[in-house]
Image (spheres, rainbow, N blue to C red):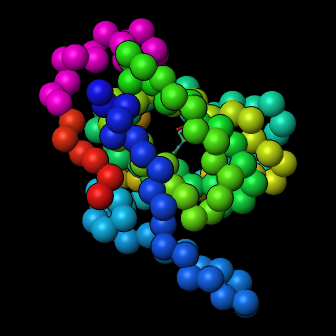
Amino acid sequence: MILDNCKIVDLPRVTDPRGNLTFVEAGRHIPFEIKRVYYLYDVPGGAERGGHAHKALHQLIIAMSGSFDIHLDDGFSKKTVHMNRSYYGLYVCPMIWREIDNFSSGAVCMVLASAYYDEDDYYRNYASFREDIGKEPAHENSVS
Ligand code: TYD
């Protein structure tokens, strides 16, 4: 099941009385090279983001501040992950429909992505995504 590849990555924590530090190394903590970083912030209460799937993009989603819920769907099964720690990342492999909601006030959602922005990589329509499930080759990516 593709959804099983989507896992929480427990990132390294360097705790320090001066403040804690966390880092992410491509290829070590996540199974892809990072080509792009983007973040959602100033999200108004009740707003939803996402509502799409990617054909080939790999992502790691981190709650840099505050909290939110990520709903994942591989076309067959679904799961929801509550993100509220900046040392946890959620790895999302290709061909996963995702929706993000329940943002707390001041939440910042940072995403590390394996490729530059490309609108052609998106499924913006759930029915088209669902139709293409099964046509895709099996994904062998997993969190190391
Ligand atoms: P989108 O991925 O649809 O946002 P979300 O799924 O988080 O709700 O992107 C919203 C808009 O921002 C869309 O018009 C494309 C643009 N955008 C970029 O130009 N570059 C990027 O890296 C991203 C993620 C989005």
Residue sitting at 55 percent across and 26 percent down? 51
Q: Nearer the viewer, residue 86 or 35?
A: 86
**Which range is magenta?**
121-138
Quadrant housing residue 31:
bottom left
Q: Quadrant of the C terminus?
A: bottom left
In this rendering, position of residue 135 left or right of residue 108: left
In this rendering, position of residue 1 left or right of residue 118: left
Quadrant housing residue 140:
top left
Q: Quadrant of the N terminus?
A: top left
Q: Position of residue 118 (x, y in %)?
A: 38, 41
Q: Position of residue 120 (x, y in %)?
A: 34, 32
Height in image: 112 above or below 82?
A: below
**Residue 126 seen in this snapshot:** yes
Name the residue furthest left. 137
Height in image: 126 above or below 103?
A: above
Quadrant housing residue 134:
top left
Is 19 contained in the magenta span?
no
**Residue 32 seen in this snapshot:** no
Residue sitting at 32 percent across and 52 percent down? 143
Residue sitting at 37 percent across and 71 percent down? 25
- Quadrant field for ligand 1: top right
Height in image: 31 above or below 125?
A: below
Q: How many marks?
A: 0
Q: Nearer the viewer, residue 69 or 54?
A: 69
Height in image: 38 above or below 56?
A: below
Is 128 contained in the magenta span?
yes
Q: Position of residue 2 (x, y in %)?
A: 31, 30
Q: Position of residue 23 (x, y in %)?
A: 49, 74
